[in-house]
Amino acid sequence: MNKIPVIIDTDPGIDDTIAIIMAAGSEKIDIKAITTTHGNVGLEGTTKNAMALKEFLGLECPVAKGAAKPMIVSLKDASYVHGENGLAGFELPRPKGTVCEKAAWDVMYDMAKAAGGQMRLLVLGPMTNVALAVLKYPDFKNYIKRIYMMGGSRSYGNHSQYAEFNIWGDPHACQVVLQSGIPITMADLQFGSDYGISVKELRQIYSHAKKLKPMMDAFIAHDIKRVERKGKKYGCRYDVESFEFAIYDATAAAAMLLEDDSLETEDYYVVCETQGSQTEGRTIFDYKNHMKKRPNVQLAVKMDRQKYIRLIENALAHFE
Ligand code: RIB
């Protein structure tokens, strides 16, 4: 079977890690590179995590560093969600290798050109690296088959009332990519929330995983503590075992892996607000086609939940 060439642009990150494992554990995917960006934690942290995960999984692909900060807005991070080290405090073995000398955007361009137009990008963090590749290389869009992004929201936000974290992290970059002409499948916040997985299910999913079980245990314990802290703060008690976690980046990986299977999408013309005093980072969907523009986004709206769960389960068990 011809494997699909993919570059994963990421800010690992708990859910990034699961998405990377899904791609690495899939016989359909050939990970050509992992490129890192600012996001969940700073660039040094995301790059260290990417290097450590790549070596822990035994991947051959290079890791290339990208942008340390957004194009224009101030740098943000989500360490209060992912922990100070970005991996819920779990320590992977220290990486022995070194990062690629080329910058992320240059690796994206060179590898996409070499892939003759078949390269996919799985974009799991702020889109700064992709935007810089689009701006630096006018023909970059000709070599990218499709972007599968975790980002944006058709409705509510998570890091502001309207903005989803990745896009809030660099709204200008998102707008550059939305206007680039590259086909985009968007796994937005709502899609991730629609496919939440309970703690009880997660424990079953990774019960067969040997090598990755300690890391998954740490992720679950960290997220349970976070939910319990939130519950105390708002005076509500959660039944933790049935609490559903949205593994956002994993749903973007699933959108890529289930594209020719059960994924259903809806076409929209989408822009990103870069100036709003209340809505900076909001992805705005032209539901009624007021702008009379051709759709630039396929919004992921449905997939086979059991197949999604199996993708995670099989990938986690793949690594011994
Ligand atoms: O809003 C969810 C996104 O923000 C995910 O990519 C998660 O890793 C965080 O970066």
Image: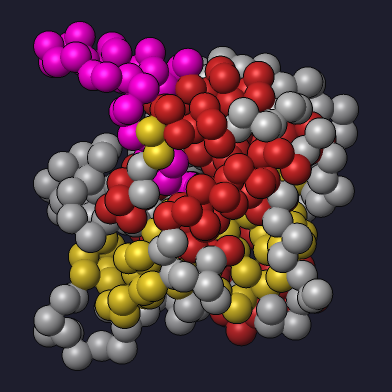
Numbered range of the magenta stretch:
221-250
Q: Which colour scheme appears in the figure?
A: secondary structure
Vertical arrangement, residue 299 with respect to residue 237, above or below: below
Vertical arrangement, residue 52 with respect to residue 104, above or below: above
Determine whether, in the image, residue 67 is placed left or right of residue 185.
right
Determine whether, in the image, residue 139 is placed left or right of residue 291.
right
Residue under the point 40% across and 39% down: 197
Q: Nearer the viewer, residue 96 or 226?
A: 226
Vertical arrangement, residue 296 with respect to residue 68, above or below: below
Dominant SS of magenta comes to: helix
Determine whether, in the image, residue 245 is placed left or right of residue 292.
right
- Label count reads 0
Placement of the C terminus among the 4 image quadrants: top right
Locate residue 165: give its quadrant. top left
Percent across and percent down for residue 187 are 40, 59
Residue under the point 67% across and 39% down: 316
Residue under the point 18% across and 49% down: 156
Residue under the point 84% across and 40% down: 58
Percent across and percent down for residue 114 are 80, 76
Q: Nearer the viewer, residue 65 or 3?
A: 3
Locate residue 209: give its quadrant. top right
Can residue 290 be seen in this snapshot? yes
Percent across and percent down for residue 149 are 47, 59
Q: Nearer the viewer, residue 104 or 254?
A: 254
Placement of the N terminus among the 4 image quadrants: bottom right
Residue 50 sits inside the magenta stretch: no
Can residue 173 be seen in this snapshot? no
Percent across and percent down for residue 86 are 54, 26
Residue 243 sits inside the magenta stretch: yes
Locate residue 112: give its quadrant. bottom right
